[in-house]
Image (tube, rainbow, N blue to C red):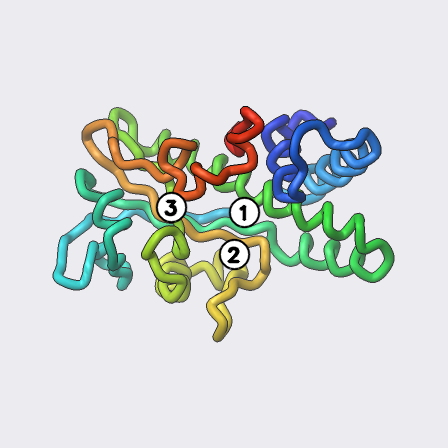
Amino acid sequence: MDEKVTSGYLEDALRYLGVRGEPPRELRAQAEDIAAEIAEEITPKYTFRAFPLARTPEGVSLEGSGVVLPGALAGKMLADCDAAVLLACTLGALFERKLRALEKRDMSAAVICDACGSAWVEQGCDMAEREIRARFPGRYLTDRFSPGYGDLPFSLQPDILSALDAARRLGVVAGESLMMTPSKSVTAIIGVSGEPQRARVRGCAFCALRDGCKYRREGQSCEV
């Protein structure tokens, strides 16, 4: 597999497919081929901006962005932060065309491709996060979190995309249903602080599904 394709990427794709334990050899081989092809052909594109924070009665405001984050999750995640970064990442229209073409001739391959796309856009977010971390030496970042996590509403998508000028920079827009186009697109918020952050949204200990998790029952984790 191409060096760009990390083991975490493939394992994430298999988990998106609902695979538990070691997958059948044929499935792993097909997923590996599709994952490698996607990584070879498509580079995730992203953009981000940092904004100072202000607390308001409506929630946490990213000053100058037009974005206000309501609810308990944002308040908890950004409690010790003085700035936050808005991030958008996408696989773009090329992935969309590839997926649609597969759906017309091989639906099982299309399902695998869709899972690989979900995993690959998350890899793009990881790439962006490494760059963001380098922009803030000596500072600490929170876990990234997105509209739809906890009580953070999906209705924030258009405001976040607008603040990032994502339509022009990435070709990403949110429709009336608030779903983004291209479909393999992600928005996220990352807090910036002067001290290590205690609030988390990643890992088994912080997951709302941990008690009934099929992976934990089998001694596994959905994190790589």
Q: Which mark is residue 170?
A: 2
Number of numbered discs visible in the structure rendering = 3
Identified at 19% across, 58% down, the residue is 59
Q: Give the residue at mark 1.
A: 45
N-term mark: 2 or 3: 3
Identified at 62% across, 28% down, the residue is 6
Residue closest to the eye, 58 or 89? 58
Which element type, helix, strand or loop, lies under badge 2? Answer: helix
N-term mark: 1 or 2: 1
Residues at marks 1 and 3, CA–CA distance in whole angstroms: 18 Å
Callout 1: 10 Å neighbours few (<14), some, many (20+)? some
Callout 2: 10 Å neighbours few (<14), some, many (20+)? many
Q: Which mark is residue 145?
A: 3
**Residue 108 image offset from top left, x and y in percent:** 80, 50
Residue type highlighted by circle 3: Phe
**Residue 72 image offset from top left, x and y in percent:** 24, 52
